[in-house]
Amino acid sequence: MSGATKRVLMAAAVAEMATGLALLIVPSLVGQLLLGEELVGVAASVARMAGLALIGLGIACWPGPPLVGMLAYSTAVALYLTYFGIAGGGTGALLWPAVVVHVILSVLLGHFWRSHH
């Protein structure tokens, strides 16, 4: 990969991580600025999960590798969904199965990451 390609990829990764962080912290403001509508209720919760995905994507692209990005995303989503369920915000039938799946993925990804280091 050329130096220019690496710089553009790094800039894109930083931009996506910054957008993800903004969605995580102030989803309603980001919705207002991007879409002209505030994100409220469940839309804000979904936006936060999208923010976590953008942060994971940014980590996967830079500094990488993709395994670390997926590990960061899966762990963060497991924690966020657990918090969401315990705090009383989530009652969907797939909430706890999704938590279990992300915990399992996080454990497996963590195991693979440790075995390569």
Image: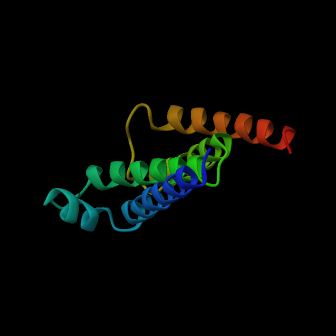
Give how far across and how far down residue 30 sits, in percent. 27, 63
Give how far across and how far down residue 63 sits, in percent. 64, 54
Q: Residue at x 21, y 59 (%)?
A: 34
Res 10 → quadrant: bottom right
Is residue 82 something that shows in the picture? no
Residue found at the very far left of the displayed protein: 36
Q: Residue at x 40, y 67 (%)?
A: 25
What is the image's colouring?
Answer: rainbow
Is residue 95 placed above or below 17 in the rendered structure? above
Give how far across and how far down residue 33 sits, in percent. 20, 65
* In-image side of 115 versus 91 (left or right): right
Frontmost residue, 88 versus 23: 23
Give how far across and how far down residue 104 sits, in percent. 67, 34
Q: Residue at x 67, y 40 (%)?
A: 67
Frontmost residue, 3 versus 75: 3
The quarter of the rendered structure image containing the N terminus is top right
Is residue 96 something that shows in the picture? yes
